[in-house]
């Protein structure tokens, strides 16, 4: 590689997921010349879409909450806010098909009353818990409200043990705490850090009456995280290179960063490494972290999505969640997929799917089609036009007790090198919100080191 092959950019961002896109936009908005390198042929990381025949399919169902201020900034920044609206008020249908007296439908919804009264009426009438169990939830919620999620001691204990010590029965954990926790943490209570669980429940349910209102894309994720994101990057002056897998990250004799792909070398004063943790470990130069192997100790957790296309409408709600069934959350994706002809496309989102992630499609079909018929009587006798599965074996980092001490800050020990990704020390679990926040942190640290003051869009110190 000759010197004329070297292109000097002020900043290079490695990785085109939500963290990398955010960092690139923030750096470009502050006046830096930015190049974004992504090894895949698209942007969006693990929140993307693909074509299957005439359908546009998301690799998995992704939602966010009203309290996800960073991801909402991202949507606004790329012009996608109206394409991923939030509920007017939290309303989650919960169907229990395991009840001895037959299927029962309950709802978790809020009122406009202040916290914690906004959920009081819903909890008081929640049919999936006994009167004593509902009362115990209120006491646990008050105890949780007094916790500091950033307390390192909470990171060392598991959520299930904390709940048990506050009188939460196994049924209460199943019908309430895990109902929310599995979907947001990608782990059941025994395998979840209490610090992360406290952050989720305190921020989502106990900070503001509308904090937990749910938003999701009414268009394919690729339209938001790839198409619109690419337009925003182009408008900001970011050079985006796809299919540009980074092979090495080094420094020259003058201290300038050199980023090598298979075809080109890029020079930069600032580098943001926004890849998955194991990939970041492989690229980190010596001395960048005091203990780089701790990145390898951040385990991953899978998510499985089962996709079913029926020949008729079988679900009249946009989504629901289930108890007494292997099915967790079911979403109607008919409109976003482009399905026509009077059928309906349902996506079944299965978090913490360690036991099923490698199960053959035929076995999953035999398991989930009867379950959907049990949950949805209208599905009985309906024709199945298509059945397929998407698997993300490393969908998130595993939020296990002790993971907090493994997650690195954005700033490394190597001047000009910063880390981004939901696995970094954001205080959040592995969500779209956490990914965007990590991009803010990396860009903010870089701009601070360069002496470029900037206003944080979330109103936080930068």
Image (cartoon, rainbow, N blue to C red):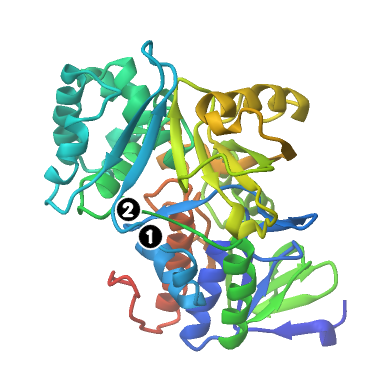
- Location of residue 209 in the rendering, given as x and y in whole percent from the top left corner: 20, 52
- Location of residue 213 in the rendering, given as x and y in whole percent from the top left corner: 32, 53
List the single residue furthest toward the top: 100
Identify the residue at horizontal 87%, vertical 81% (top origin).
Answer: 2
Q: Nearer the viewer, residue 315 or 111?
A: 315
The residue identified by callout 1 is: 86
Examine the image and state in which quarter residue 88 appears. bottom left
Tell how many labels: 2
Q: Nearer the viewer, residue 242 or 343?
A: 343
- Location of residue 174 in the rendering, given as x and y in whole percent from the top left corner: 37, 23
Image quarter where the N terminus lies is: bottom right
| C-alpha distance separating marks 1 and 2 | 6 Å
Q: Nearer the viewer, residue 45 or 400?
A: 45
Residues at circles 1 and 2 in contact by the CB criterion of under 8 Å: yes
Residue 345 visible here: yes
The residue identified by callout 2 is: 213
Q: Is residue 438 above or below residue 304?
A: below
Identify the residue at horizontal 19%, vertical 41% (top origin).
Answer: 119
- Location of residue 313 in the rendering, given as x and y in whole percent from the top left corner: 58, 44
Q: Is residue 275 left or right of residue 289?
A: right
Q: Is residue 160 left or right of residue 54?
A: left
């Amino acid at each position: 590689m000759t010197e004329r092959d070297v292109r000097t950019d002020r900043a290079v961002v490695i990785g085109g997921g939500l963290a990398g896109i955010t960092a690139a936009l923030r750096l470009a908005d502050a006046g830096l010349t930015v190049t974004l390198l992504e090894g895949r042929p698209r942007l969006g990381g693990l929140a993307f879409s693909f074509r299957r025949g005439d359908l546009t399919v998301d690799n998995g169902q992704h939602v966010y909450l009203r309290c996800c201020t960073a991801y909402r900034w991202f949507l606004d920044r790329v012009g996608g806010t109206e394409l991923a609206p939030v509920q007017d008020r939290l309303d989650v249908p919960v169907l229990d098909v395991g009840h001895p007296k037959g299927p029962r439908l309950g709802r978790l919804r809020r009122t406009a009353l202040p916290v914690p009264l906004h959920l009081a009426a819903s909890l008081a009438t929640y049919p999936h818990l006994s009167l004593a169990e509902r009362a115990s939830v209120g006491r646990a919620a008050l105890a949780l409200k007094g916790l500091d999620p950033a307390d390192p001691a909470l990171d060392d204990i598991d959520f299930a043990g904390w709940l048990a010590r506050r009188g939460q029965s196994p049924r209460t954990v199943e019908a309430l705490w895990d109902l929310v926790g599995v979907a947001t943490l990608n782990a059941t209570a025994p395998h979840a850090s209490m610090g992360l669980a406290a952050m989720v429940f305190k921020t989502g349910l106990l900070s503001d009456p509308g904090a937990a209102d749910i938003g999701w894309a009414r268009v394919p994720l690729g339209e938001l995280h790839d198409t619109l994101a690419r337009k925003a990057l182009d408008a900001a002056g970011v050079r985006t290179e796809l299919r540009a897998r980074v092979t090495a990250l080094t420094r020259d004799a003058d201290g300038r960063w050199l980023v090598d792909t298979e075809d080109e070398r890029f020079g930069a004063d600032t580098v943001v490494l926004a890849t998955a943790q194991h990939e970041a470990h492989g690229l980190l130069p010596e001395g960048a972290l005091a203990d780089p192997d701790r990145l390898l100790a951040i385990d991953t957790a899978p998510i499985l999505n089962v996709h079913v296309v029926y020949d008729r409408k079988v679900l009249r709600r946009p989504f629901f969640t289930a108890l007494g069934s292997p099915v967790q959350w079911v979403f109607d994706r008919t409109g976003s997929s482009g399905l026509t002809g009077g059928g309906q496309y349902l996506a079944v989102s299965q978090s913490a799917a360690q036991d099923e992630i490698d199960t053959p499609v035929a076995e999953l079909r035999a398991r989930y089609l009867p379950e959907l018929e049990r949950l949805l009587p209208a599905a009985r006798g309906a024709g199945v036009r298509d059945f397929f599965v998407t698997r993300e074996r490393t969908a998130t980092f595993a939020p296990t007790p002790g993971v907090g001490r493994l997650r690195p800050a954005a700033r490394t020990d190597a001047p000009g090198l910063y880390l981004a990704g939901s696995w970094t020390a954001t205080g959040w679990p592995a969500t779209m919100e956490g990914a965007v926040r990590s991009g803010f942190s990396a860009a903010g640290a870089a701009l601070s080191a360069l002496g470029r003051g900037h206003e944080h869009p979330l109103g936080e110190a930068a």
